[in-house]
Amino acid sequence: MKKFLPLVAVIMLSISGFSQNSAPVYLWPGIVPGETGGKHEPVQTPNREGDVIRLTDISNPAFFVFKPVKEKSIGVGIVVCPGGGYSILAFDKEGTEIAQWLVKQGITAFVLQYRVPKKREGALMDAQRAIRMIRKNAATYGINSNKLGIMGFSAGGSLSARTATLFATRTYAPVDQTDSISCRPDFVLLIYPAYLDQGTNRSLTPELTIDKNTPPMFLFATADDSWGNSALVMATALRDAKVPAEMHLMAKGGHGYGLRPGNIAAETWPGLAEIWLKNIIDRH
């Protein structure tokens, strides 16, 4: 039987010597809302196709903190939601590797280890709780509490969009004073998001209510991505509601590329996102 490394060791390997806070910050001090089983370590699946670390069976949600050196920090934080169809988390390709890119820009990254598999409601609870905890401890993390965004890939893009539009919805009973803090992200980046077009005739998913309070968004997708319509319908809804939005659609690139070299879409979106981030951060 194949043995797997402890999760912290897996994470340290996945960031190639990029040394930051490797200890998980757990979201729920007691019973995890909506769960009946006990807490245990996530399971790394045996599937390493595409050189991706895949985690599943997450019962004790947490986030991992990646901070730039103090003199390079710009006081901004972003919660990173890896994708994986709400079944697994592509933890390095769409998590720790994204954190490394953000840190190079002076941004503190919080890689979210949300509940999977098939726990969409639990995942939303986890995202809301994470934002509240990070905002409460903003000074500790060296960020401005009003400059905290969220970004996600594929299913993580779905989770980010849900977090950005359902922040006024109480998804769990308050655990402590932290839950009195706003869980509205200040800005959002959706990179090849999925599941946003599950309304009638591939229209916007009904739970995603867009209004003037929806935070500004950056969206990136490709025309040859089977999930590409998600970004299009979201961008249209944002435009109709007069919410600031920037949408990029490339011809090719497919799905699930992260920012790894060798894919034209993966090599393009980071530069566009950097420009957008600088502009949106300057406005806050």
Image: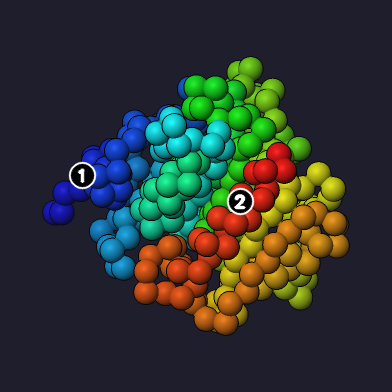
Q: Position of residue 51 (x, y in %)?
A: 28, 63
Residue 176 occupies quadrant: top right
Q: What is the residue that sits farthest to the left in this orientation?
A: 1
On the rendered structure, is 156 left or right of 113? right
Residue 171 seen in the figure: no
Residue drawn at x 71%, y 39% is: 284
Q: CA distance from mark 1 to mark 2?
A: 35 Å
Residue 90 occupies quadrant: bottom left
| Numbered mark located on residue 129 in the image | none
- The one nearer the camera, 193 or 205, is 193
Residue drawn at x 68%, y 25% is: 181
Q: Nearer the viewer, mark 1 or mark 2?
A: 2
Assess disc 2: are there few (<14), some (14-19) or many (≥20) residues with their C-alpha within 10 Å of its C-alpha: some
**Residue holding disc 1:** 5
Give the residue type at disc 1: Leu
Residue drawn at x 20%, y 44% is: 5
**Upstream in the sequence, badge 1 or badge 2?**
1
Above or below for 220 versus 13:
below
Above or below for 137 versus 159:
above
